[in-house]
Amino acid sequence: MNGNQQDNRFIWLSGAVVNVNDAKINALSPTAQFGLNVFEGIRCYWNEAQQTLYAFRLNDHLKRLQTSAELLEIDNPYSMEDLRQAFEAAVRANRYREDIAVRQMLFVDGFSTWSSHGPAGMFVAPIAKKRLSAEYRKEGLRCRISSVERIHEKSMSPLIKCGANYINSRMAMLEAQKEGYDTAVMLNRKGTVAEATGSCIFIVKDGRLITPTLSDSILASITRNTVIQMAGMLGISVEERSVRPEELFTCDEAFLCGTAMEIKSIESIDGQTVVNRAGGSVTRLLQKEYCRSVLGDGPPEWVTAL
Ligand code: PMP
C-alpha cells in the first residue's frame, strides 16, 4: 500500500486493527473534551540494505507512556507487552517499507469527565514520514525566545507527555509564527531556558555540549538522552545545567532535538545569528551518528526490528 495516503491506512484501536476512517471516538469522552490523554510519537526507519524496518527506542517510549499514565492517574490496563504488541500489529498491518512516524495514545474514553481515571482506550496510528536528514543541508531554524512561559511542575508537569500540555506549546508556536519565526524557545519560571515547543535544546560552547536539566521544566526527552549518550561515545563532554537566555546569543552552535525534529541546527535566536549558521561541526557529528543509530548501526538496544 502507499503509506502516504492518510485515508487508506490501518490503525489499532482498543483491540482491533481498523481502517482509519472507521476509527471513531466518543465526542463526549474526556480525551475529546479536555485533552485527557497521554501519548508517544515513535519513529521507525527503513533500512534498505537490510530490508528491515527498525523502531527507534521503542521500549523507552512505551515506558514513558506508562509513566505519563501513572502521573496523570489514568487506569492503564495495558502491560509493556500489550503496548508493544499493539504497536507491532498496527505497523505490520500497513506493510510499510519506508520511514514512518507512529502515534500511540492512551486516552480516557466513555461518558466520564476531566477528573475520571477511566475507562482507558488506546490507539496506535502509523503514517509515512521521511527523515529530516535529507534537509540537513538547508538553513537552520530561526527561533524566537517566547513570551509564553513553559508550564511548571506545580501547575501542569512538563514531564507528563499529555495532550493538554500541548496548548502551552501551541501558544508559543503561534506567537513565533505570527512574527515570522520557525519556532519558539520557552523559558521557565526561573527565567532560564526550558525547551522548544516540541523539542529540547542544546548549545555548544568551546566544544562542550550544554543542555538544561530535567528540573528546568522540560520533558524527559528520549532524543535528548540519545544525544547525551552519543556525545559520550564520541568523546564530547556534556553539561546538564540551567542555561541563561544570554548564553543562547554567545554560543558557538545550537540545535533542537526530538523524535519528530531529529537533530536540527538553530540558525538564529531573536534574529541574532548563531555563529556557525547551518550547524557547526559538533552538531554535524551528532546528526551523522543519529542517522547511523536509527538504522541499527548504533547501540543494538536502541532499535527493534519489526
Ligand atoms: N519537549 C517537548 C515539549 C516535546 O513535545 C517533545 C516531543 N516529544 C520533546 C521535548 C522531545 O522529546 P522526544 O525526544 O522524546 O521526542
Image (tube, grey):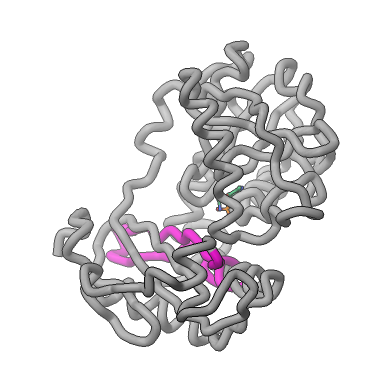
Q: Residue at x 46, y 73 (%)?
A: 29
Q: Residue at x 25, y 78 (%)?
A: 18
**189 left or right, relative to 76:** right
Q: Residue at x 32, y 51 (%)?
A: 129
**240 left or right, relative to 172:** right
Q: Is residue 40 located in the magenta-colored stretch of the structure? A: yes
Residue 39, relative to residue 84: is it above or below? above
**15 left or right, relative to 41:** left
Residue 128 position within the rendered picture, expressed as x and y whole percent measured from the top left: 29, 55
Residue 228, relative to residue 237: is it above or below? below
Residue 250 figure quarter: top right
Q: Residue at x 40, y 73 (%)?
A: 123
**190 left or right, relative to 96:** right
Residue 217 position within the rendered picture, expressed as x and y whole percent measured from the top left: 75, 47
Residue 259, relative to residue 92: is it above or below? above
Q: For the magenta stretch, what is the residue range? A: 36-63
**Residue in front for this viewpoint, 190 or 115:** 115
